[in-house]
Image (cartoon, helix red, strand yellow):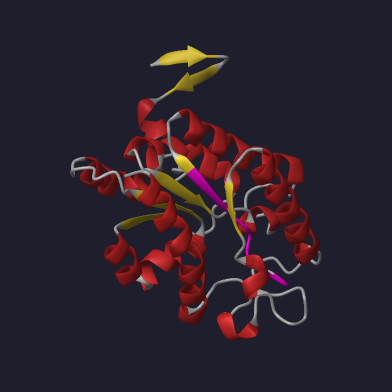
């Protein structure tokens, strides 16, 4: 045991601290995936509960295409960035599909700061590209409100501004940008289409099927060029 700045460091106490980024969530699955032959078509979907639920509710979609889901419910881009190496880079995918920022805007872990959220996403893109991973950047999905944080009243405006910024960033940096937002928007111009959700934030199966029809051709076109 060693004293540091007037405190005592204890490995036992350190082990009891929560796994804030949830590195352990996919640790075993990552080890298993890395041990498998790499056919050059590995694609990781990276995100929050929207991605997490997608993989658990539509496993046939992921299995039939050989896609890998690495979403964790409730996470913000701050946590994404912390686990990006573990859950993306170390898997050596050909492509990563990033869907982010719903929980930033809902203020799950930090007060919302658009510049920081945008910077977190840019950092993930830069890390991916530095490791030879192609990036597909996607829009944050519409959400008129967040049931777990009703104090956020201007979520739709924040989502719109961030999506516009991400679209420009993608164009300026030669990234593929996929627009889920406009296809899923309710006629009210603010919310996730009521036919696609039960709580206004999380997609139902019909919504996921629409998202699949949008993203799959983009991924497969990219993979075909890598042969």
* On screen, residue 19 above or below 217: above
The range drawn in magenta is 135-145
| Rendered-image quadrant of the C terminus | top left
Q: Residue 201 at what x, y percent from top left?
A: 61, 71
Residue 13 part of the magenta-drawn span: no
* On screen, residue 85 above or below 3: below
* Residue at screen point 76% across, 73% down: 190
| Rendered-image quadrant of the N terminus | top left
Q: Tell me if I can see residue 118 in this picture.
A: yes
Predominant SS along the magenta part: loop
51 vs 145, left or right, is left
| Depth order, front residue of 49/174 | 174
* Residue at screen point 50% across, 33% down: 129
* Residue at screen point 29% across, 58% down: 66
* Residue at screen point 48% across, 73% down: 208
Quadrant housing residue 187: bottom right
131 vs 101, left or right, is left
Q: Residue 113 at what x, y percent from top left?
A: 75, 45
Q: Tell me if I can see residue 152 in this picture.
A: no
Q: Residue 189 at what x, y percent from top left?
A: 77, 75
Quadrant housing residue 219: bottom left
100 vs 145, left or right, is left
């Amino acid at each position: 045991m060693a004293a540091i700045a007037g405190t005592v460091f204890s490995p036992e106490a350190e082990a009891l601290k929560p796994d804030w980024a949830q590195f352990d969530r996919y640790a075993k699955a990552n080890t298993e995936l890395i041990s498998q032959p790499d056919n050059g078509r590995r694609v990781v979907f990276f995100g929050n509960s929207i991605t997490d639920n997608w993989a658990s509710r539509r496993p046939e979609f992921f299995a039939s295409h050989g896609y890998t889901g690495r979403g964790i419910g409730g996470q913000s881009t701050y946590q994404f960035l912390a686990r990006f190496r573990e859950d993306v880079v170390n898997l050596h995918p050909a492509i990563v599909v990033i869907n982010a920022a719903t929980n930033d805007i809902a203020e799950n872990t930090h007060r919302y700061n658009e510049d920081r959220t945008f910077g977190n996403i840019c950092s993930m893109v830069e890390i991916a590209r530095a490791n030879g991973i192609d990036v597909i950047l996607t829009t944050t999905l519409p959400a008129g409100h967040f049931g777990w944080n009703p104090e956020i009243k201007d979520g739709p405006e924040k989502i719109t501004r961030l999506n516009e910024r991400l679209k420009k960033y993608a164009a300026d940096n030669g990234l593929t940008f996929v627009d889920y937002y406009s296809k899923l928007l309710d006629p009210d111009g603010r919310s996730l289409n009521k036919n696609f959700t039960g709580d206004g934030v999380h997609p139902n199966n019909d919504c996921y099927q629409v998202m699949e029809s949008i993203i799959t051709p983009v991924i497969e076109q990219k993979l075909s060029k890598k042969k």
